[in-house]
Image (tube, grey):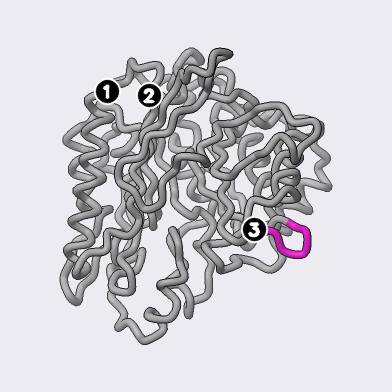
Amino acid sequence: MFQLWIALTAVVPSLCLDSTTMQAHLKAGEKLLGTYQASSSITSRWMSAYNDSTLVQNLNLPGTHDSLTWSVSAVLSPFVQTQDITLFQQLNNGVRFVDLRIGIVSEKLRLFHASYQLSSSVELVDIFWGLYHWLDQNPTETVLVSVKVDNGNSTAALQRQVYDLMNGPEVSDYWVHNTTLPALGDARHKLIPILRLTMDPNNIPDYKPFGLNLARGWKDNNANISIKYDYDADNNYRQVVYVQDLYNPDADDEEAAINKKYEVLTTHLNRSVATGFENTNKWYIGFASGYNGVLTTPKQLALGSTIPRTVGVNTLIRPYLQSNRGSYFGVIMFDFIGSDQRLINATLGWETSWGTKTFTITSPILSAMIVIVAPLLVF
């Protein structure tokens, strides 16, 4: 257990970003970012409790899978929605790993969940500027930003745009440019790029290595992934990340799917717990999220149902985290994280008695639309 000390958290000016441009991006991105509201909660600045020398890979990090899907239409929400609060609310509540899915439409980078475009107007650059704004208000924090191509391919044009957005001179100081996870002191008031897309140097003439490139080796729908990265001059790897990303358990029914997902998640977490906080070359990312073919929606897997009565992964995993309080979990990626603040508290190793449980579990009768739409989704 650590002693909580609060560092200086006064809001600092943005790093020379034009305020008019900032406001334009916040307005343009509002449908997916939400509206920023300052928070006085310790969850908005919890990293201030850690020394600068703390390695980011040794932190327990609450994360959200498909972080921008909170505002999809009611008709499509059973199949597309995986979050229930805005991106700004997620960050204020303690989330520090966000998951962005992209594709090119009319030469602009747009946001997707699988093949579904989340907004016809919001661009990736708007989301990035929203994150810069949040960091300006919470300068003790860092946010890990995973970017994955969900619609189309990782074309040369797409790679160049992503590279330029993260390395342009105006915003470069908001990004960590290491190829491995830094110490927290080198990451405060910055974003850490987690690249789940190929970045071919041949497509980017002025390319300089940056970010954690985890695209090659991230096996699809797999419970036990290991990805080596950060190679030295002799091509020997120095870091490895272990990922549990079984997003479709392919079970016989909802209860079996939830139980299988819980089993693979706790197996993964048992490994991270055994590794401990002091390791310097292993990192862990575990997904609590998923669905089960046409039988179980993301919301049902996360929150369970009333008919038939099931208890979701979010409810099942909280006692595990509480019973292992003080242990190393790494990153845990949740769906519907706004349903219960205690999930974030438990991931961070905090007391959970003051967390709030805000959701009501429902189980709509699934129509034939599931049979048509669900198979198109790839999580």
Give percent across and percent down for residue 72: 53, 69
Q: Split into 4 quadrants, where in the image is the C terminus? A: bottom left
Secondary structure of the residue carrying numbered label 3? strand
> Which residues lie in the magenta part?
103-108
- Relative to 267, 81 lies left or right: right
Q: Quadrant of the N terminus?
A: top left
In the picture of the structure, the residue carrying the numbered disc 3 is 103
Q: Going 74% across and 37% down the picture, which residue do you hit?
A: 202
Majority secondary structure in the magenta region: strand
- Crowd tier of the residue under label 3, counting other residues whose Cα lies within 10 Å: few below 14, some 14–19, many 20 or above: many
* Residue 225 spot, x, y in % from top left: 36, 39
Amino acid on which disc 2 is placed: Lys
Q: Secondary structure at mark 1?
A: helix
**Residue under label 2:** 282
Label whose residue precedes the other's in the sequence (2 or 1) = 1
What is the crowding at mark 2: few (fewer than 14 residues within 10 Å), some, or many (at least 20)?
A: many
Q: Is residue 265 left or right of residue 333?
A: left
